[in-house]
Amino acid sequence: MTRVGYDQRVLTLVEVRGGEVDWAEAEEHFEAHGWPVRGHHLCGEGPWEEVLESDPSSRVYEVEVRLFGSARGCDRGAAQRVRKAMRAARLEAYVRYAQPLVRDREMMTQWRAYDARWRHQAQDPGTRDEWRYRIKSWAARGGWWDTRIRVSGTPREALHLARRGAPAADRTSHTTLAVRPLDGRWRSPEKFRPEDETNRRIALHCVGLFASMAAAVFAFSSTGSGWWVWGTVTVVAMAAGLWTGIRIHREGWWAGALGSVAALVFFLALGLGHLGEDGQGWSRQQVFFTGLIAAVLVGLWLLVRQWTWGEWVAWAVPLVASLVASSFIAAGSVLHAIYADTLGLSPDDLEVPPIWQVAAAVKLLSLLSVIMLLPAWWGFARHWHHPYASPGERFNGALYVLLLLVFVLVAAVRATHSAEAAVDKTVAAAQRGENPPAYFGVEPAWTCVERTVAAGRLSGEGPRLTPSRPYLSFGVAHGTAILWDPKTREPVKLSASQVRLLPAHSGSAKCHADGGERA
């Protein structure tokens, strides 16, 4: 199917050998890929006479190759696509010349036409009223006298377009129509600004601002030689951010400089914690994962926007792997299972509300997002026309599966570390006698245990119950009271019908020998 969307256009000179049959087949493939043929000549004839050697069995096609990706390196990307398309068709073809066709769109100033009859009336000495004139002038700037005519161009072109393009019914008011600008581009000494070039400069400016903030966070959290290294990186990133911001505005450096300085100060204040009430800035981990997530999202977007059926494995396999891993949540939270296993409990011992299972699922998906690094890299490689990432290249499936397994292993380690870190905090708080933190709906609390039956008839699992000291309670699941002994660091499971759980304010509280906290 012919691809409609594209970013770049490259004029290529393709020599196809083999005669009439091969020429016709090559033209069919050019059309199938959506590459218009601008003309063709026998090799060594027409405009290429005395440039190429004459060969009646070869025909030279002027083909406009349309492709996604960046402007830099698009000539190489176009040549690769033509070679691989001809190789797949088993045709003898050679790309002899490639030149990008730069067609950047101009960002013309937008104007709105308005009725300026009040201005002509104000020129009459008998009706001149200075304050009334000012009020009407302000109203005109605010759109009070606007018509439904919108034009673009230079100030002179906009005025003539508005007056000559008005409907015939408004011919009598053509001389009273005026235009007001909707942006400030008309002040530029150059004619207009290119749109793609401006977008590239804005993107580079944003990258420079984030790099400045990230380097500043690393510098302020480093000591010794690390401080000097990251300080140097911060200065370089700030200079790059300011330079790219200045180059956004082609009509003058001062506007870009002021905007860049203001944006840079905001980013630095945000990263170093000067905008928050607690004064806490971003940590190294937050900066790293923010940049990582942003890069993954951009890479996936670059990949999906030029996606083809032949490359489904570059993004579908990691996505399916993430969904399959997250499907375990239907039977129970994976993070909750790791949390319970680290404490010596089973997943059935924790009754977690569904809303917290959903929250744990979102956390798990965020941990599994590292799997998407591979297709994100593929998207960047495709965008920059990497030779081994272009369509039609032979795909190394074994290497891809190996890298995918590595990313899955990293994601599993991150998920395990998240649950184990929560358990470590719970154990540490229990050793100090403090209230432990919650973990996605699991809220351990101190409790005194009172027996309702004789000690010899008490049934359960774990160490012998000591009613004089409090235990951590994880609630009641399936008729069993789930407790955790901070002294032995082992779970205690008792029949809920044989004990009574009474809350304690901390782990240092003293309980009665027969249960209940002492006053």
Image (cartoon, rainbow, N blue to C red):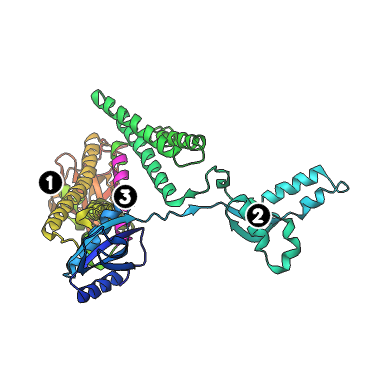
Q: Say what amino acid the circle numbered 3 marks.
A: Arg
The residues tagged by marks 3 and 2 sit, at their Cα atoms, a distance apart of: 39 Å
The residue carrying mark 3 is 72
The residues tagged by marks 3 and 1 sit, at their Cα atoms, a distance apart of: 70 Å
Q: Which residues are magenta?
A: 287-306
Of the two numbered discs 3 and 2 on the same chain, state the one appearing first in sequence: 3
Residue 220: x and y in percent read 32, 28
- Residue 285, located in which quarter of the rendered image? top left
Residue positioned most to the left = 398
Residues packed near mark 3 inside 10 Å, few (<14), some (14 to 19) or many (20 plus)? few
The residue carrying mark 1 is 463
Q: Say what amino acid the circle numbered 1 marks.
A: Pro
The residue carrying mark 2 is 159
Q: Nearer the viewer, residue 284 or 298?
A: 298
Q: Main secondary structure of the magenta part?
A: helix
Residue at (26% x, 54% y) in the render: 76
